[in-house]
């Protein structure tokens, strides 16, 4: 519990806080006890400058001084839980308390409100005094309302504007005034590759026969084959990993999130790549547009026979200590080691930039997005590339990362190798 001086310990409101944190609803969560004590102590002392989400995260949850409240919502989540625990206390053990403790929504100040449990007057009390009290009651209530409103206004939380997007996402917004197009994988394309057991070039993917479902069917398809191919070629589906990456990049975009638009790989055309900024999610086996840039990368996705051999990243020019190949999971949903690359490239004509997040399996792709969401990871990536802070000139690169997947969930991501790309 928060250490307090004797003066605060003698305050009836702090004594109420001590009763609350000692009650059964709070016994199973030391974090909620610490949070309530911190909010109450600062509120009672009038130290409202400490009641910001960032200050609370650092003081109560041990967050780093530079952590981002946009990326980390743990303070908001715990405050919501704290409000529920307070309701539980005052509905149960604390229902006879003369004062109720509240944390208003949208704020982190602790308010103490009288419940109306007044003491019963002793017999023989002056009738005149009672009548005078009744006459003064409306004025007293008006004064309390005015003071409460003034205090709430003075203690209102500051409105913090969304931060700008961090590097390397900032490089995309800086390279164009147009929307940044986030192109998610075409899962149906990947399924058709597996059904037909053959790779598909970008040219084939863009052909009318492929999009009609007639390009890669068996010589004598059954009615079921026709229905499956028609569905896979005609619908727009993406993966859970892509949804996670989209959500992550939307949050990272901060004040520029309105400039981020999402579209399917199926909707893109070669002419769209003449200028602008793009994020491609997925590898060539799920997002064929990534193959358009493969010749510019050192780490390239490869595989043997489609559907029968494991995919791997081929290291075109291994450095000392690096492997020639990096093999990932056998299939999505399994446990083990998977790999992904994060690459920032200029468009061929220099009129925009491209960020590529590709994993051998969905776990790798998801890990690439989560890697960028972590400020510490971004700093390690900059250090590996030989710079820090916000670069004054574009820094194009590719990074190979490793993640340990457990039952389909990526974890423990680290940098394996990096390359600086010189346009």
Image: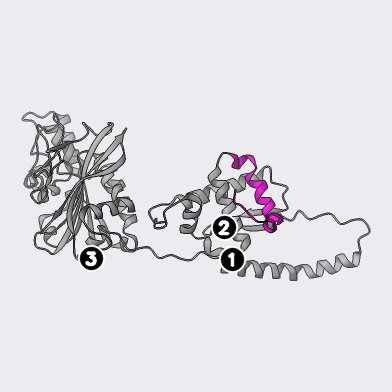
Colouring scheme applied when the structure was drawn: one colour
User: What secondary structure prevails in the magenta region?
Assistant: helix
Which residue is at the far right? 124
The residue pinned by badge 2 equals 104
Closer to the chain start, of discs 2 and 1, is 2
Query: What residue do we see at 53% from left, 45% from top?
Result: 31
The mark closer to the camera, 2 or 3, is 3
Which residue is at the far front? 320
From the viewer's perspective, tell me whether residue 357 is left or right of residue 70. left
Q: Where is residue 415 drawn, in percent x and y?
A: 24, 45
Are discs 2 and 1 less than 8 Å apart at CB?
yes
Closer to the chain start, of discs 3 and 1, is 1
- The residue closer to the viewer here, 381 or 289, is 381
From the viewer's perspective, tell me whether residue 86 is left or right of residue 261. right
Q: Residues within 10 Å of mark 3 (few under 14, many from 20)?
A: few
Q: CA distance from mark 2 to mark 1?
A: 10 Å
Residue 209, quarter of picture: top left
From the viewer's perspective, tell me whether residue 51 is left or right of residue 149. left
- The residue closer to the viewer here, 57 or 410, is 57
The residue pinned by badge 1 equals 152
Q: Residues within 10 Å of mark 1 (few under 14, many from 20)?
A: some
Q: CA distance from mark 3 to mark 1?
A: 40 Å
Visible residue check, residue 124: yes
Q: Is residue 108 magenta?
A: no
Q: Which span of residues is magenta-colored?
A: 1-28
Q: Where is residue 70 drawn, in percent x and y?
A: 39, 56
Closer to the chain start, of discs 2 and 3, is 2
Are discs 3 and 1 less than 8 Å apart at CB?
no
Q: Secondary structure at mark 1?
A: helix
Visible residue check, residue 90: no
The residue pinned by badge 3 equals 174
- The residue closer to the viewer here, 239 or 402, is 402
């Amino acid at each position: 519990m928060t250490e307090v001086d004797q003066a605060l310990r003698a305050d009836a409101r702090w004594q109420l806080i001590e009763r609350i944190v000692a009650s059964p609803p709070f016994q199973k969560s030391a974090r909620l006890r610490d949070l309530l004590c911190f909010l109450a102590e600062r509120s009672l002392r009038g130290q409202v400058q400490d009641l910001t989400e960032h200050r609370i995260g650092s003081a109560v949850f041990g967050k780093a001084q530079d952590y981002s409240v946009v990326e980390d919502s743990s303070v908001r989540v715990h405050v919501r839980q704290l409000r529920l625990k307070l309701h539980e206390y005052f509905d149960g053990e604390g229902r006879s308390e003369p004062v109720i403790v509240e944390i208003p929504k949208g704020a982190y100040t602790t308010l103490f409100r009288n419940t109306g449990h007044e003491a019963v007057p002793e017999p023989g009390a002056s009738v005149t005094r009672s009548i005078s009290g009744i006459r003064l009651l409306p004025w007293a209530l008006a004064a309390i309302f005015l003071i409460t409103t003034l205090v709430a206004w003075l203690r209102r939380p500051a409105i913090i504007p969304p931060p700008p997007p961090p590097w390397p996402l900032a490089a995309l917004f800086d390279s164009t005034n147009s929307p940044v197009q986030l192109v998610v994988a075409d899962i149906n394309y990947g399924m058709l590759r597996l059904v037909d057991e053959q790779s598909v070039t970008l040219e084939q993917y863009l052909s009318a026969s492929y999009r009609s479902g007639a390009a890669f069917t068996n010589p004598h398809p059954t009615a079921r084959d026709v229905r499956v191919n028609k569905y896979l070629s005609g619908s727009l589906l993406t993966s859970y990993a892509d949804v996670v990456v989209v959500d992550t990049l939307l949050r990272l975009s901060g004040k520029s999130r309105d400039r981020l638009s999402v579209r399917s790989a199926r909707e893109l055309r070669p002419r769209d790549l003449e200028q602008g900024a793009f994020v491609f999610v997925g590898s060539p086996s799920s997002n064929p547009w990534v193959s358009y840039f493969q010749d510019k990368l050192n780490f390239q996705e490869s595989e043997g026979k489609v559907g029968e051999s494991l995919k791997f990243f081929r290291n075109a020019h291994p450095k000392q200590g690096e492997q020639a190949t990096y093999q990932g999971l056998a299939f999505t949903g399994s446990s083990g080691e998977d790999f992904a690359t994060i690459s920032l490239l200029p468009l061929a004509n220099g009129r925009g930039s491209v960020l590529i997040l590709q994993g051998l399996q969905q776990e790798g792709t998801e890990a690439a997005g989560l890697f960028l969401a972590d400020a510490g990871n971004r700093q390690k990536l900059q250090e590996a590339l030989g710079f820090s802070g916000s670069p004054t000139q574009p820094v194009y690169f590719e990074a190979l990362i490793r993640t340990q997947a457990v039952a389909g969930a990526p974890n423990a991501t680290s940098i394996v190798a990096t390359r600086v790309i010189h346009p």
